[in-house]
Image: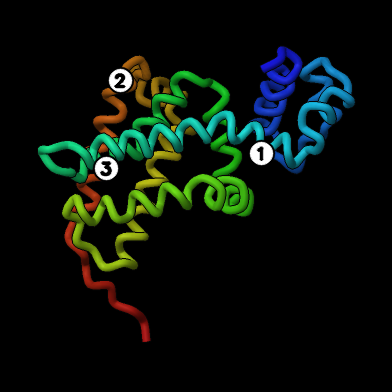
Amino acid sequence: MSDTKTRILDAAEQLFGRNGFESTSLRAITTEAQVNLAAVNYHFQSKDALIDAVLERRIGPVTRRRLEMLDVAEADPAGLTLEKVIEAFAAPVVEAAMGQPGLAPLMGRIMATPGAFLERVFLRYMEAVKSRFLPALLRSGVRLPPEELFWRLHFMVGSLAHVLVFAPVMPAMSNGLCQLNDGRAIVNRLVAFCAAGMRAPVEQMEKEA
């Protein structure tokens, strides 16, 4: 990848994370990247294509890593466990966030914009993940009604998003108790928390007449 293209992607990622997609102009990106508009048009043709390129650079590898880890978990002769399925879902995100400082602000901004999340992340990346992970959860022994399963998946994704966005302030919020230097420990805690939620008994919800 050329230096110019990388500078444009880096600048766009930073500004999208800080200001959102709609509020970030191509002029702001070219100023941040110290390039001219012709360079953006040459490499990406449009703002929409640039947004897609930024997301693919960060989310594409995470999606592929998730599916690779699930492949390994499903091939384990010892059998597929709930913890292994959740680990395959969560670990690549935590690993990427620790290695790519710009990922957390970008994902935080997307999560705060449901329309952008649905259009640019879920339909392009998460649909394939859902089609693999839902059956894997059932094969791992999860026994939940479909509606309850989707709610708990929603809560699991929310927990992961919260870790992604708020982990940087955890040391200050916990008065130094919670540190970020051990990604494996963060994943283990998250997996244990989500697995317990998946195994929790289903309460009969009373609906108002």
| Disc 3 residue crowd, few under 14, some 14–19, many 20+, Cα 10 Å | many
Residue at label 2? 177
Figure colour scheme? rainbow
Q: Amino acid at mark 3?
A: Val
Residue at label 1? 52
Q: Is residue 127 left or right of residue 37?
A: left
**Residue at the left extreme, as displayed:** 78
Quadrant into which the N terminus falls? top right
Of the residues under marks 1 and 3, which one precedes in the sequence? Answer: 1
- Per the model, the C-alpha gap separating discs 3 and 2 is 28 Å
- Per the model, the C-alpha gap separating discs 1 and 3 is 28 Å
Instruction: Mark 3 and mark 2 in contact? Answer it, CB < 8 Å.
Output: no
Between tags 3 and 2, which lies in front?
3
Secondary element at image label 2: loop
- Residue plotted at (81% across, 35% down): 45
Which residue occupies the foreground of this view, 66 or 19? 66
Of the residues under marks 3 and 2, which one precedes in the sequence? Answer: 3
Q: Quadrant of residue 107?
A: top right
Q: Quadrant of residue 69?
A: top left
